[in-house]
Amino acid sequence: MSNMKKVLAVLLALSMLLCLAGCGGNQTNGDDKPSENVKLRFTTGGESGTYYAFGSVIAQHATNNAGISVNAVVGNGSQANIEELEAGNAELAFCQSDVMAYAYAGTNLFDAPVTCFSTVAALYTEQVQIVTLDPSIKTVADLAGKKVSIGAAGSGVYFNAVDILGAYDLTEDDIEPTYQSFGDSADALKDGKIDAAFIVAGAPTTAVVDLSTTKDVCLVSLDDEHVEKLLEKSPYYAKCTIAKDVYGTAEDITTVGVGAVILAKNDVSEDAVYKLCKDIFDNAENLVDSHAKYGELNLEYATSITSVPYHPGAVKYFAEKGIELK
């Protein structure tokens, strides 16, 4: 072989090695241990929302303290966040527990199953709030024949509303539905254009708080019989309470909520997810001043997801806390 051919052969070999290194990504170094430059993109929510605000604090603290690099980026909500994971544009994502269940099963918002992700942890509850200014509307059954905002068409809120109406043997045909955002729903209530609105978000929710400053807001409670019926059919909901002092209602409100959950792509290393979980939960008590949602974290709720398997890194962390997951 000539000297020139030898040089070309060496260059080709080096080029192949570099390509292989690049294809391997930055998650592991071949023995399931993270490389020093592991970088995780965390898609959250809009800049004015809790997903982005809390996600940014989580990302910054993990980057500074956990030996991983997490970058919180603005997201477009639960469905879009899962699509970003599937497209390879993110490694971590915030998502509502109901929407992640839809994705994994390929129902409602998704035409086919999306199974490229796993559960990291459920962090806090986003309550289903049925808001009205009409004190005669006391139960979901009273919504029959009323003008009701049930969220934007095809949104997570829409399916939440359909689920809850269904538990009371009602459908869209039994109400006069409108399809509006939280803010538009609040304005429509204020102007008397609708009788009630479904809003799904962590309480207190800005749109409802703003409405309560000028109007006497009522929230519709769910009764235990229908909550149990709903949970049997849709286990990604959880029974919860909105205390009367949140909006100044006459009494505590019984409702259901979905979880705000962190997801990870399946190919993120076990060690990286373990470190993220450890950083979030081991430090939560001392980080409430940086974001109030840290005060809502607990291990029981974090491990309550049943619709999507947990990531091996999360399984390892929670096992150390005495909680066995699959």
Image (spheres, rainbow, N blue to C red):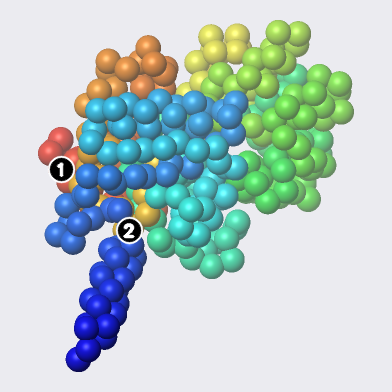
Residue 318: quadrant of the picture = top left
Three-letter amino acid code at the position of disc 2: Gly
Local SS, label 1: helix
Q: Residue at x 41, y 22 (%)?
A: 293
Three-letter amino acid code at the position of disc 1: Ala
The location of residue 58, given as percent across then percent down, is 37, 29
**Number of residue marks:** 2
Closer to us: 241 or 304: 304
Q: Residue at x 41, y 18 (%)?
A: 291
Q: Is residue 109 left or right of residue 174?
A: left
- Quadrant in which the N terminus is drawn: bottom left
Q: To which residue does mark 1 refer? A: 319
Q: Is residue 208 left or right of residue 92?
A: right
Distance Cα–Cα, label 2 vs label 1: 28 Å
Graded by Cα atoms within 10 Å as few (under 14), some (14 to 19) or many (20 or more), the crowding at tag 1 reads few
Give the vertical position of 39 relative to 83 (above or below). Answer: above
For this orientation, the residue located farthest to the front is 3
Mark 2 or mark 1, which is nearer to you? 2
Question: Marks 2 and 1: CB-CB under 8 Å?
Answer: no
Closer to us: 261 or 169: 261
Closer to us: 96 or 258: 96
The location of residue 81, given as percent across then percent down, is 52, 48
Q: Residue at x 40, y 61 (%)?
A: 116
Query: What number is the disc on residue 25?
Result: 2
Local SS, label 2: loop
The location of residue 232, given as percent across then percent down, is 44, 49
